[in-house]
Amino acid sequence: MSLDRSVRSPLSAIGPARGTGREIPDATVARLPVYHRVLGQFADAGITTVSSDELAAACGVSPAKLRKDLSHLGSYGTRGVGYDVRFLAYQIAREVGLTQPWGVVIIGAGNLGHALVAYRGFASRGFAVVGLFDTHPDVIGQVLGAPGAQVTVRSLAELESVVMSGGAHIGVIATPAESAQDVCDRLVAAGVRSILNFAPTVLAVPADVEVREVDLAVELQILAFHEQRRLDEAAPTTPYPPSLGEAINA
Amino acid sequence: MSLDRSVRSPLSAIGPARGTGREIPDATVARLPVYHRVLGQFADAGITTVSSDELAAACGVSPAKLRKDLSHLGSYGTRGVGYDVRFLAYQIAREVGLTQPWGVVIIGAGNLGHALVAYRGFASRGFAVVGLFDTHPDVIGQVLGAPGAQVTVRSLAELESVVMSGGAHIGVIATPAESAQDVCDRLVAAGVRSILNFAPTVLAVPADVEVREVDLAVELQILAFHEQRRLDEAAPTTPYPPSLGEAINA
DNA sequence: CCGTGTGAAATATTTCACAGCC
DNA sequence: GGCTGTGAAATATTTCACACGG
């Protein structure tokens, strides 16, 4: 998960959910998309019913956690039987907001921007890239994306007009770190309140804007931490660092 | 955060950390890389000392959380003054494992693979791409990466020999979902125990292997969930909430 | 004084274990 | 009989608030 908090509204929160659910825990929200994806695979495989044990195993969580998570949405299972795959998938989709289309603008058409535009399972979940921007003259005008869902790289100057024309709900920042805060400010000023940031910088935003940070280097460092622990444990060698500087090569 | 846990060693853990620290909470470990990055920026800016308030603000966390996190590493601050930027950065680097080089293999040389290889702040944190693999004949042999840290795309058939030759600690899966489990199995068989998975699939691994999943679609869905809540709140078209004595919070 | 380091309290999340329903 | 849904217990994490040391 990315870092932080977000926008808890401890006071103003009045009627948090519709339908059955009340206030769904953040930890649960972060797992719902995975459940939804796996349920989709099950449906594609022709499976019509799953038990919490089966679904939990496929999602890599404990059965108890899965059941507790689902219980926050309502009682969509059948005791003694399990869950109807398609029905449950739909209920999760509705809760997460996948039953309506979301417009996404991507800023930065470098390698990462290319990868994002090409990402399948984007459109399949209701996310449409309504704008792709860059400042580099060479890439402006390029047409990217799979046939059928193509996007033309536009000048960053057009960002505001695209966002304010109403189609953009989520901004994805795929620029170098140096430009990220500036781009973020412009997104916020234009009305975007949900931002996914791939640039390795902490963004400053107003309290009502939610930012999720995804940083590859952070993920690697978390792995490195545990890897180091394992190695330390396996080899009770020197109590202090053996040596430092090392040449790194590929 | 990835889904699962593993490797807990509640009893057997004898000397988990070196130096001062004991058993560091996962939540803290996930934030240390951010502290480290921001401290590096401060150092570059010529700042030699920071208070927990200043550093916390720059990292987007609360001062109390920051101090508690750092307290798990030891007492590296000075009361009434703050922390020495470079000293603290070094202590975090040592704890996370950044003072030694880590070999990384990347499987999949598509757009995402390209982006990963090109990622700066990779080498700068001691991560070296020691192998980049793909199955597509057209890309095998291509040379990617910034000048000075270039990598040649090799056939996936060479994965095992590269990993087993000893230089690879971490595997990064940037393949389509269909191939991810197969690649994962091969990495694990070759001895890799830390895997970063960008493919939208839950990987099955032995208990002593740590997997972190990063799925763009999941991140977007989490944003969509909150965005939906906001929109619902703004447009009280719902049949339930608004009326009855709902003013619970104060 | 000032700001760190830290017990203790408040929250959040996960796990247990079993009653209830198909 | 089997499996969901859920209170209650166990853990984990965050926040508070203040004693302590430079």
Image (cartoon, coloured by chain):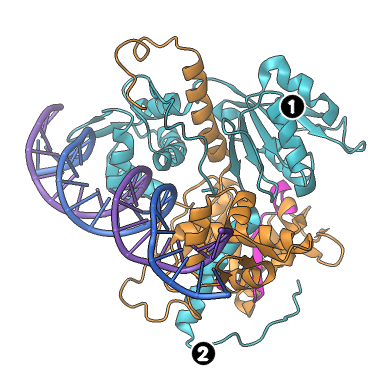
Chain colours: A cyan, B orange, C purple, D blue
The residue at which mark 2 appears reads as A237
Q: Are marks 2 and 1 on the same chain?
A: yes
* The magenta stretch spans residue A205: no
Q: Is residue B120 left or right of residue A241?
A: right
Say which element carries label 2. loop
* The magenta stretch spans residue B101: yes
The picture quadrant where one finds residue B248 is top left
Q: Residue at x 34, y 10 (%)?
A: B243
Check the residue under mark 1 and report the chain it is in. A
Say which element carries label 1. strand
| Amino acid beneath label 2 | Thr
For the residues bearing labels 2 and 1, Cβ distance under 8 angstroms: no
Q: Residue at x 48, y 78 (%)?
A: B20
Q: Residue at x 63, y 38 (%)?
A: A196
| Amino acid beneath label 1 | Gly
The picture quadrant where one finds residue A89 is top left
